[in-house]
Image: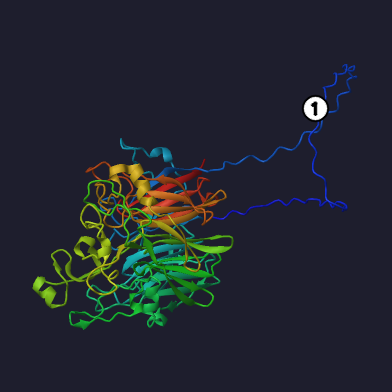
């Protein structure tokens, strides 16, 4: 960042001498030094003057502030939902300020429910640590359950709260429009208000800051055999004077159907089986079918909605005044400038740079904030490939129907864009590699990018995610990326346990596939600083960065409540999926809180975030 320099100006006086006729004479030689004169006698001491009156005491100055503020996280609340089968029991969480309750999406239950957990009273001393320093007991529990299937069938994917209004996204079968369910939660018992039809597979729902609009990302994923591939879309539901509109405005990407090449030049990725025939259907995938909205965040002023298109490595921007829709490609991360551990079979921490290797940012969660009045978007660059299966009775039938291969567990593979680098023929520019377990051979990369001249040799490799978080400006320009921080920090803290998986204790198991996997994200203000909390899905930890100035980002602290003893049973809080930040003003404790929904452990963890 450029610092402004304040340069003081000095004024000098110009002396103009009188002009003399003729040239000046040369300087004469210095004369001899004269003898030193005698020192005179000391004079008498003068009379002492009277002491002056004491001046009035000045006002006390303001207390000084530390140049660096250290955040101190403490686990103060914990609940485990559906303990008998916890996976998916606490994915997405939201906080209701008025009642001091957490609403958590429980997808482990069949059908899905909303669990309500009060945090009005937090007895942190009730939580105890085991020998490994991990909290495994609880001091919170669900006090109420909303049975969604009584109102609408389908899979619940997301929820959001504004004032006393709760919105829940429910997806239907592929090809059927999803619903947003609205509840009044002002009273102890939530009251169902209405449902509004949106697009196919609503994956995320949020309110604008003023609560006057609800924005929905409709992912529109295809059916396993691509016989149905809905268009991705963005739904807008207006709320006027507290009245929820009966119908949503649906924005699609049809205007981009003839601009695929332009988008690809920006780094937008399109991966699909276009040109193949599957189960008798010739596959032709349009741009608007391939673009898949994943996550939504709205600017502080409510003017813009920013939507991550994860699999496409892109960002959509919606002007909420005009509903104009713009798509921005996010480009690629050059791994020759950073280091990563690319192998899960090298039995060591092995960071290296790889010229010719690029990362697709492919953000999942995003969040927005303002600096100097401008909007900035923070992204957790998880990464995601595409892999679709359909039912088939055996390998012969699978291949006859146009499938790629048969798997007894998953069925017939219709499409994947994923391969290990060692299974691809690499161009001569990769001659510095063995392309084996000791360098890049195990790394999962896309087969859709890197072979520009179609000679079946890859001159470039593109891997999923950027193993980082980034900050982007409103125009989609990247102004910050955390580089290789995630890998380096977790390796330094956890040693051989780094790049662990979320459902087993075996270090290095995710090095070949997106690393620690930044996925969950929240932004919050503590004191006069703005912080980003980045949840690592596989590792289970949360990185905290000071992003007050997007051009001067600083790592602050790291928090984790997970057991990592090799080959031991998994314990603690696993796979942070969703987060909600509660500022001190709205916190029941008077201190900022971070609420985390942990997908694998089915736990809700509440962290107190104090300043030091």
Q: Pinpoint residue 19: horizontal percent, then vertical percent.
A: 87, 53
| Helix, strand or loop for disc 1 | loop
Q: Camera-side residue: 369 or 510?
A: 510
The colour scheme of the drawn protein is rainbow
The residue that disc 1 covers is 33
* Above or below 100: residue 212: below
Q: Pinpoint residue 430: horizontal percent, then vertical percent.
A: 26, 61
- Within-10-Å neighbours for mark 1: few <14, some 14–19, many 20+: few
Q: Left or right: where does residue 376 sit relative to residue 295?
A: right
Q: Left or right: where does residue 357 sit relative to residue 480?
A: left
- Residue 200 seen in the current view: yes
| Picture residue at 13% right of the left edge, 74% below the top | 399
| Picture residue at 26% right of the left edge, 47% below the top | 507
| Picture residue at 42% right of the left edge, 51% below the top | 595
Q: Camera-side residue: 164 or 356?
A: 356
Q: Left or right: where does residue 412 sit relative to residue 367?
A: left
Q: Camera-side residue: 578 or 238?
A: 578
Q: Camera-side residue: 408 or 486?
A: 486
Q: Pinpoint residue 62: horizontal percent, then vertical percent.
A: 67, 41
The N terminus: image quadrant: bottom right
- Residue 99 seen in the current view: no
């Amino acid at each position: 960042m450029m610092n402004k320099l304040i340069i003081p100006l000095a004024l000098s006086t110009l002396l103009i001498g009188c002009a003399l006729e003729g040239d000046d004479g040369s300087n004469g030689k210095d004369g001899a030094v004269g003898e030193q004169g005698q020192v005179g006698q000391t004079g008498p001491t003068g009379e002492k003057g009277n002491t002056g009156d004491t001046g009035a005491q000045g006002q006390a100055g303001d207390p000084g502030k530390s140049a660096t503020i250290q955040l101190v996280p403490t686990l103060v609340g914990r609940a485990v939902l559906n303990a008998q089968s916890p996976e998916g029991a606490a994915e997405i969480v939201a906080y209701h300020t008025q009642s001091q309750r957490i609403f958590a999406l429980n997808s482990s239950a069949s059908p899905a429910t909303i669990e309500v957990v009060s945090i009005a009273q937090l007895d942190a001393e009730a939580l105890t640590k085991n020998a490994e320093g991990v909290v495994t007991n609880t001091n919170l529990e669900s006090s109420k359950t909303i049975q969604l299937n009584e109102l609408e069938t389908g899979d619940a994917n997301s929820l959001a709260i504004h004032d006393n209004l709760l919105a829940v996204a429910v997806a239907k079968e592929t090809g059927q429009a999803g619903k947003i369910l609205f509840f009044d939660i002002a009273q102890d018992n939530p009251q169902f208000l209405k449902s509004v039809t949106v697009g196919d597979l609503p994956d995320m729902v949020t309110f604008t800051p003023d609560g006057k609009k609800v924005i929905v990302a409709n992912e529109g994923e295809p059916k396993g055999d691509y016989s149905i591939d809905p268009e991705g879309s963005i739904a807008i539901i207006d709320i006027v004077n507290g009245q929820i509109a009966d119908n949503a405005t649906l924005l699609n990407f049809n205007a981009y159907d003839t601009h695929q090449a332009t988008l690809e030049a920006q780094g937008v990725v399109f991966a699909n089986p276009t040109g193949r025939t599957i189960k008798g259907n010739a596959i032709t995938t349009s741009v608007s079918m391939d673009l898949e909205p994943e996550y939504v965040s709205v600017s502080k002023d409510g003017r813009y909605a920013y939507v991550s298109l994860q699999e496409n490595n892109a960002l959509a921007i919606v002007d909420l005044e005009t509903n104009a829709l713009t798509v921005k490609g996010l480009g690629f991360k050059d791994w020759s400038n950073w280091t990563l551990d690319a192998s899960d079979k090298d039995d060591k921490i092995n960071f290296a740079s790889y010229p010719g290797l690029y990362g697709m940012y492919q953000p999942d969660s995003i969040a927005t904030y303002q600096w100097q009045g401008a909007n900035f978007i923070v992204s957790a660059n998880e990464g995601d490939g595409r892999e679709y299966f359909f039912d088939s009775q055996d390998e012969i039938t699978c291949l006859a129907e146009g499938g790629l291969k048969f798997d007894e567990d998953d069925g017939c593979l219709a499409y994947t864009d994923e391969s290990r680098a060692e299974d691809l023929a690499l161009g001569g520019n990769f001659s510095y590699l063995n392309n084996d377990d000791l360098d890049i051979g195990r790394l999962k990369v896309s087969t859709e990018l890197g072979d520009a001249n179609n000679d079946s040799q890859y001159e470039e490799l593109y891997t999923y995610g950027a193993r980082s978080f980034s900050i982007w400006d409103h125009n989609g320009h990247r102004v910050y990326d955390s580089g290789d921080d995630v890998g380096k920090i977790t390796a330094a803290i956890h040693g051989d346990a780094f790049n662990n998986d979320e459902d087993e204790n075996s270090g290095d198991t995710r090095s070949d596939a997106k690393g620690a996997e930044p996925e969950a994200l929240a932004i919050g203000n503590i004191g006069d600083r703005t912080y980003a909390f980045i949840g690592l899905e596989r590792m289970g930890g949360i990185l905290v960065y000071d992003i007050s100035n997007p051009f001067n980002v600083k790592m602050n602290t790291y928090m984790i409540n997970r057991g990592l003893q090799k080959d031991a049973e998994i314990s603690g809080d696993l796979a942070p999926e969703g987060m909600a930040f509660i500022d001190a003003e709205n916190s029941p404790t008077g201190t900022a809180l971070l609420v985390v929904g942990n997908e694998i452990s089915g736990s809700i963890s509440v962290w107190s975030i104090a300043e030091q």
